[in-house]
């Protein structure tokens, strides 16, 4: 397989950016190569087909790109936390702040998640959250609870806020962040 030229890489990035916007605006079902080509200002859908074998490959690539951006955004904020409780707060805050700062990407991520080929994302979040909760318990920061069950609850709270914010741009993300962090602290503290 040959390396992609700078022009090909730029075209792929252009297509992915347009796909993010189309998915965020119209949803997965209404997203088509035709709409993406129009948004990207491409002369034909053939330019998309040249880079992606079909909708599934494009969806998987868009999802992976947004996940890379999201992961970088979150990890940059986790580096500042020196306790499990701080890391938990930083993780949840970063999730909501990503939505506020990168709305189209966050909405596209949520809308594409059920349609991607790779299904390990949700399990990875759950496993990492449960491990963080266990570490917090071991350090005496958190009360006794089942870390796997609490992980389900905390991720459901986070996802619920993100889903609501994706459906309604008027949702106050900062207020949601404050209330979410209070709820999580009350649920986990000793």
Image (cartoon, rainbow, N blue to C red):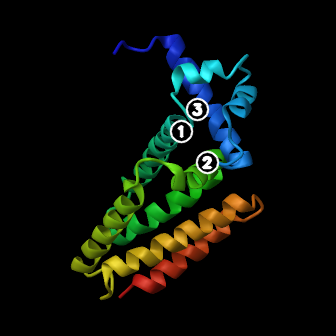
Local crowd size for mark 3, using a 10 Å CA cut-off: few (<14), some (14–19), many (≥20): many
Q: Is residue 71 left or right of residue 7?
A: left
> Sequence-wise, which precedes: disc 2 or disc 1?
1
- Disc 1 designates what residue? 62
Q: Crowdedness of circle 1 by 10 Å Cα count: few (<14), some, many (20+)?
A: many
Q: Earlier in the sequence, mark 1 or mark 3?
A: 3
What residue appears at the point 67 percent right and 58 percent down from the top-left corner?
166
Quarter assignment of residue 18? top right
Identify the element where label 3 is drawn: helix
List x then y, in percent, for residue 37.
70, 26
Give the CA separation, mark 3 to mark 2: 11 Å
**Which element is circle 2 on?**
helix
Residue shown at 45%/85% (left/top)?
A: 187
Choose the circle earlier in sequence order: 3 or 2.
Answer: 3
**Which residue is denoted by mark 2 in the rendering?**
108
Instruction: Give whichever of 85, 16 is nearer the camera.
Output: 16
Residue ID at (71%, 65%)? 172
Q: Separation of disc 2 and disc 1 at Cα?
A: 9 Å
Residue 177 image offset from top left, x and y in percent: 59, 68
Could you say which disc has been placed on residue 16 in the image? Answer: 3
């Amino acid at each position: 397989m040959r390396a992609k030229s700078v022009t090909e890489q730029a075209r792929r990035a252009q297509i992915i950016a347009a796909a993010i916007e189309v998915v965020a605006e119209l949803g997965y079902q209404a997203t088509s190569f035709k709409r993406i080509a129009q948004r990207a200002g491409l002369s034909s859908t053939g330019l998309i087909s040249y880079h992606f074998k079909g909708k599934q490959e494009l969806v998987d690539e868009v999802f992976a790109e947004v996940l890379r951006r999201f992961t970088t955004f979150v990890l940059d904020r986790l580096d500042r936390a020196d306790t499990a409780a701080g890391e938990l707060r930083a993780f949840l805050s970063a999730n909501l702040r990503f939505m506020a700062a990168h709305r189209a990407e966050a909405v596209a991520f949520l809308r594409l998640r059920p349609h991607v080929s790779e299904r390990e994302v949700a399990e990875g979040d759950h496993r990492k959250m449960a491990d963080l909760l266990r570490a917090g318990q071991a350090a005496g920061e958190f009360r006794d609870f089942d870390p796997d069950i609490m992980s389900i609850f905390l991720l459901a709270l986070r996802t619920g806020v993100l889903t609501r914010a994706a459906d309604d741009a008027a949702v106050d993300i900062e207020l949601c962040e404050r209330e979410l962090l209070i709820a999580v602290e009350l649920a986990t503290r000793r």
